[in-house]
């Protein structure tokens, strides 16, 4: 009888402990649920993903690698080149830009020489969200083809082969997505500097950034 009483007493203790453990694991219904961490991307309606700076620190290639790097930015109110409410863009948005890097070769005395293209390429991917701006990065890595101590000229333009007439038409999403009469979308260098870049053995990395904005249409030379 004494042994049976001890066994019953132990069973009561074990059952109570298990119940307390189960109760401790249950969430208090009066406590608020934790807020999930948002995914760091921004979707422009039904359009492509625009990455944030938390995913990509800049729109250009990794800093300080040998070569020429930079970005083309534009204010968000200028919009995006597709109607996001009707159709998804058939291409990565940064494909609307082209970057060219050229160098002037010396010619015979009294001549201007010839222009040699070192890099002529389309941008790729989708824009980075930089707060007030969208930005697309470009980069020409130095693989032994970029000269030293020679001036190279970097230029950027809208790719008419991709836009097919939309380069100065109405874009979407932005509040100022159509150039005013007499103006067009133009890409300029940021900071008022010229387009010349020179690399050396001690300075193998260079950056040049551009901005797309509206500018008066220039009359063709007579």
Image: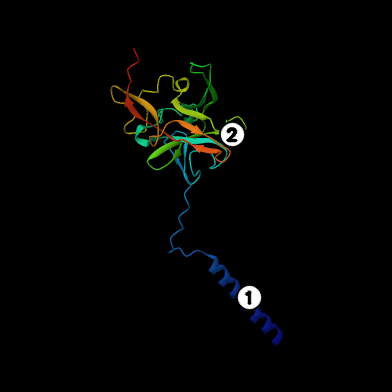
Disc 1 residue crowd, few under 14, some 14–19, many 20+, Cα 10 Å: few
Residue behind mark 1: 14
* Residue drawn at 48 percent across, 52 percent down: 37
- In this rendering, is residue 7 above or below 26? below
Q: Which one is in front, 156 or 182?
A: 156
Residue 199 x/y as whole percent:
54, 35
* Residue drawn at 49 percent across, 33 percent down: 197
Q: Residue furthest bottom?
A: 2
* Residue drawn at 33 percent across, 28 percent down: 214
**SS of the residue under disc 2:** loop
Q: Nearer the viewer, mark 2 or mark 1?
A: 2
Residue behind mark 2: 142
Residue 132 x/y as whole percent:
37, 41
How is the rendered protein coloured? Answer: rainbow
- In this rendering, is residue 214 above or below 5? above
* Residue drawn at 33 percent across, 20 percent down: 218
Answer yes or no: is residue 9 visible: yes
Answer yes or no: is residue 1 visible: no
Q: Quadrant of the N terminus?
A: bottom right
Disc 2 residue crowd, few under 14, some 14–19, many 20+, Cα 10 Å: some
Q: Which one is in front, 195 or 150?
A: 150
**SS of the residue under disc 1:** helix
> In the shown orientation, is residue 162 left or right of residue 146?
left
Report which quarter residue 12 is drawn in.
Answer: bottom right
């Amino acid at each position: 009888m004494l042994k049976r009483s001890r066994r019953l007493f132990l069973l009561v203790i074990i059952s109570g402990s298990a119940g307390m453990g189960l109760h401790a694991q249950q969430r208090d219904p009066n406590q608020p649920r934790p807020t999930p961490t948002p995914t760091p991307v921004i979707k422009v309606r039904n359009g492509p993903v625009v990455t944030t700076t938390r995913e990509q620190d800049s729109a250009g290639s990794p800093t300080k690698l040998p070569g020429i790097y930079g970005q083309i930015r534009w204010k968000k109110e200028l919009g995006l080149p597709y109607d996001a409410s009707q159709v998804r863009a058939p291409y990565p948005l940064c494909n609307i830009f082209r970057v060219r890097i050229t160098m002037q070769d010396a010619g015979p005395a009294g001549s201007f020489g010839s222009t040699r293209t070192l890099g002529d390429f389309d941008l790729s991917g989708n824009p980075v969200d930089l707060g007030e701006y969208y930005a697309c990065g470009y980069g020409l890595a130095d693989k032994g083809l970029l000269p030293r101590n020679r001036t190279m000229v970097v230029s950027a333009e809208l790719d008419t082969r991709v836009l097919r007439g939309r380069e100065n038409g109405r874009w979407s999403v932005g509040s100022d997505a159509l150039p005013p009469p007499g103006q067009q979308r133009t890409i300029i260098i940021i900071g008022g500097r010229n387009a010349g870049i020179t690399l050396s053995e001690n300075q193998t990395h260079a950056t040049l950034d551009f901005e797309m904005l509206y500018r008066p249409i220039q009359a063709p030379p007579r």
